[in-house]
Image (cartoon, grey):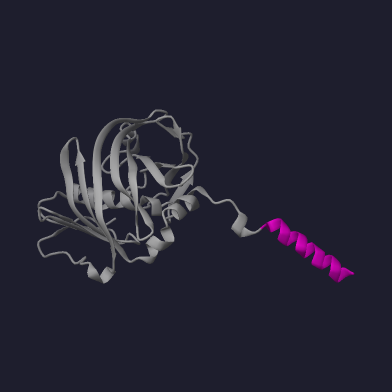
Amino acid sequence: MKAILLFSGLLLLLSGCGDASTMPLSFADKIENAHAKDKFMAEEAVRFDLHLSFGGKERLNGTLSLLTNSTKGRIDYVDGRTLIFDGGKVYYSPEFTEAQASFAAYTWSYFFMLPYKTTDPGTRLVPTHERKLRGRPYNSKKLVFDPHTGASPDDWYILYAHTTSHLLHAAAYIVTANKSAEKAEEDPHAIEYLAYEEVEGIPVATQWKFWGWRTGIGFTEQLGEARLSNFSFVAAKALDFQPAENMITAGTF
């Protein structure tokens, strides 16, 4: 009799736990699944061309080569300049200033990688009341960083994901490099991800638009735009992350 009671109690306990496969997915899970993170991370590296302009002036025209685990990357500009980042170090051609090199090395790669970064160590997703853009509702969370995470832990992103596809549609953000969070929050911006295409079963946005952004309002004026093209997944050994002798090294974080 005692054995029957113990067995019955175990069944009740197990049934109360529920099947993990039927548990609702989190905001981060939905984004990562929509962007085929497992497939993306199964690849070693991704390479693509990026043509970026702000205020009608070309800001970047070149090729990005990135390890999918975000630890290394390089940007080869069509004019011959090069940036390489490896962990917390940046190596750059003498034509750059250190501030220009550090910003370019990490900013554009992070924008591309953002759909895969929602569960990185040192990140947290917290509720936000920002839910609409141009009057359209989105699933939304605010991505913040624990202290001492990365080069700019005071940065934040408000992520807007489509309610049906769960693809990332936009992210409002502040950049605190060389300024306080309070100063950065006086001029927040946003990136909009558009024209998704599939590359070997992985959706990638082939157009970016950059906007001014305001709390409770959303997009304001357009600031810039980018085109991404010629995507390919490659082996890590096909990429060269060794800096040339004339390259300068930026500080380590």
Q: Image quarter for residue 250?
A: bottom left
Q: Residue at x 20, y 47 (%)?
A: 51
For residue 253, side relative to residue 16 (left or right): left
Q: Position of residue 102 (x, y in %)?
A: 22, 51
Q: Residue at x 50, y 47 (%)?
A: 27
> Which residue is at the front of the view, 178 or 73?
73
Q: Is 6 contained in the magenta span?
A: yes
> Which residue is at the front of the view, 200 or 253?
200
Q: Which residues are magenta?
A: 1-18
Q: Image quarter for residue 171?
A: top left
* Numbered disc total: 0
For residue 120, side relative to residue 220 (left or right): right
Q: Quadrant of the C terminus?
A: bottom left
Residue found farthest to the right? 1
Q: Residue at x 28, y 38 (%)?
A: 210
Q: Position of residue 173 (x, y in %)?
A: 35, 40
Dominant secondary-structure state across the stretch colored magenta = helix
> Which residue is at the front of the view, 47 or 104?
47
Q: Is 227 contained in the magenta span?
A: no
> Which residue is at the front of the view, 9 or 57?
57
Q: Do we see residue 151 in this rendering? A: no
Q: Position of residue 104 (x, y in %)?
A: 22, 49
Q: Position of residue 131 (x, y in %)?
A: 46, 35
Q: State whether residue 37 is above or below residue 205.
A: below
For residue 161, side relative to residue 8 (left or right): left
For residue 18, side relative to residue 202 (left or right): right
Q: Quadrant of the N terminus?
A: bottom right
Q: Do we see residue 237 in this rendering? A: yes
Q: Residue at x 28, y 58 (%)?
A: 88
